Image (cartoon, rainbow, N blue to C red):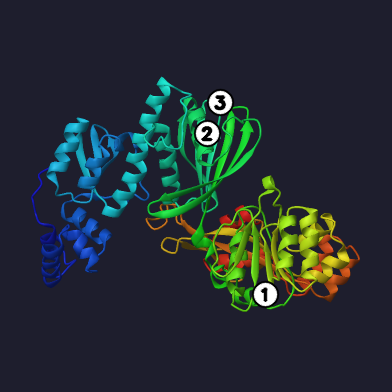
Amino acid sequence: MAYTRDRLGEILVRAGVVTEEQLLLALSHQHLEGGKLGQVLVREGAVDEETIARTLAEQKSLEYVSLNTYPISREAAAQVPERVARRSLILPIDYRDDQIVLAMADPLDVEAIDDVHLRSGRVVLPVVSTPSQIRYAIEKYITAADAFEGLVDAMEEEAEAPVTVGDEDVPIVRLVNQLIREAVLDEASDIHIEPGETGVRVRFRVDGVLHEVMRIPASARPGLISRLKVMADMDIAERRRPQDGRIGLVVNDRGIDMRVATLPTPYGENIVIRILNHEAQQQTLEDLGMNESDQALLETFLARPYGEILVSGPTGSGKSTTLYAALMHLNQPTRKIITIEDPIEFQVPGVTQMAANAHIGLSFAWLLRTVLRSDPDVVMVGEIRDAETAQIATRAALTGHLVLSSIHTNDAPSALTRLVDMEVAPFIASSALVGVVAQRLVRRLCPECRTKVRATRGYLQSFGLVPEEIASGYVFEHAEGGCDDCHGTGYRGRIGVFEIMAMDHELERLFLAQAPTDALRKVALTGGMRTLRQDALEKVSAGTTSLAEVARVII
């Protein structure tokens, strides 16, 4: 293929993407400030990166490739050193017969093409991608590949090499740092490191779904686990008991807090790292995804001067986010707010926050007793885990305090019977409880690639539904293969699904009579409670999520 050295500006003008006036202005700024012309044009708002890339591809009869969705070969990516890839904004992404596919921000860079040809010994097939996509892929594939290769070589020499906090150049340290960096880039909530008979599987949980990202040789397992335990300030020698720890790092100029938990298995310790999302904790009530009636009901709960408000749901259902949103709503200079958390996930200005630590005797129950002597108006207890905490929190709600907490139940009515299981007397619980918010998290459909489909009877029955539950007759689903905006998944972000139950006289009467959960649920529904299922299906009809996602989480 013959390459003519056309100038980028000439190509864009000829294609009608930018005007001559915009080009001249950009060239003037480039002369004064430096940088590449494409970067200047994007910065000036004359054109976006993808338009430049697609125009270059079309003008040069090349393929445009989105690296957000393309299955990049780590073997191909390793053909070019990181410094070369970053300097020229290139990345080998695949092999096709005797060719190596090279993603380029500038397909006019003949020198870069020749360099990759010499390094790989293959004919180079250039394709065009955007600079930001290439930078992201370099970070994810080349840096990780380099760390992984160094790790394997090192482990062959010394599998049990000791690792200390300061050994930043050790391959195992670089690998751990890269795993965390990748997880942050992918916006993962958890990193799962799972030893097996033949190696170590690494998975990320993104938008509530686990994805395998790497396999690490079994020889690397001891060093990998030791490094993480050192970072989390755990006992390296203790391998028979579960441990908990915390890690604080700066990743891409962003402070990251992580909770680490180990679990002994026959093949070594299983480690789960929870990445605390501070941005998520800054959400307001309006950001949670409640409909207007549910939000209004929750706001009436929060307007009460005293009483107990519980947020229920399984682990990872967004309970902490809802509690923080409630705190943000209540946080005013006229109120004294104290929280007891394990750990403190987000610092709230104007709120007194305390961290529980059972190892030194600072249990939820002990701290709660202490807090009540500090004249609070509002108390937030991160989680009701035991009978003592449940009893103290409930009594506090009867003595002039507004108490917010979370509890593990499947729905709102079950929270009442759960309190009884924790030895809270029904007459006390019924008097103290204001309401219960049960919730789940479902993935949002990508608005750029979602598709509208007819909700036929057969289609709905496959999800255990009937046509009457979808009044519009249509639902939205994710497009096959997704798009660039959602990285090929069809989903982007998550939203809450809610069930809010307010205590009333009839519920209180049944609860005092120790009625079963089904009877409590029936009365709550009669009183206007919308179920998790109903709220989820409304979001399906609105195109916010899909039936498949609702079936995965709720139905």
Residue located beneath label 2 in the image:
225
Residue located beneath label 1 in the image:
302
**Which mark is nearer the camera, 1 or 3?**
1
* Image-based side of 106 in relation to 179, left or right: left
Q: What residue type is disc 1 on?
A: Leu
Instruction: Give above or below for 105 relative to 9.
Output: above
Q: Secondary structure at mark 3?
A: loop
Q: Position of residue 99 (x, y in %)?
A: 23, 35
Give residue 432's mark.
none
> Which one is in front, 13 or 34?
34
From mark 1 to mark 3, how far is it between C-alphas?
52 Å
Residue 41 in view here: yes
Give residue 197's mark.
3
Residue 90 in view here: no
* Image-based side of 11 in relation to 295, left or right: left
Residue at image position (51%, 35%) is 201
* Image-based side of 535 in relation to 181, left or right: right
Question: CB under 8 Å between callouts 1 and 3?
Answer: no
Q: Secondary structure at mark 1?
A: helix
Label 2 crowd bin: few (<14), some (14–19), many (20+), radius 10 Å: many
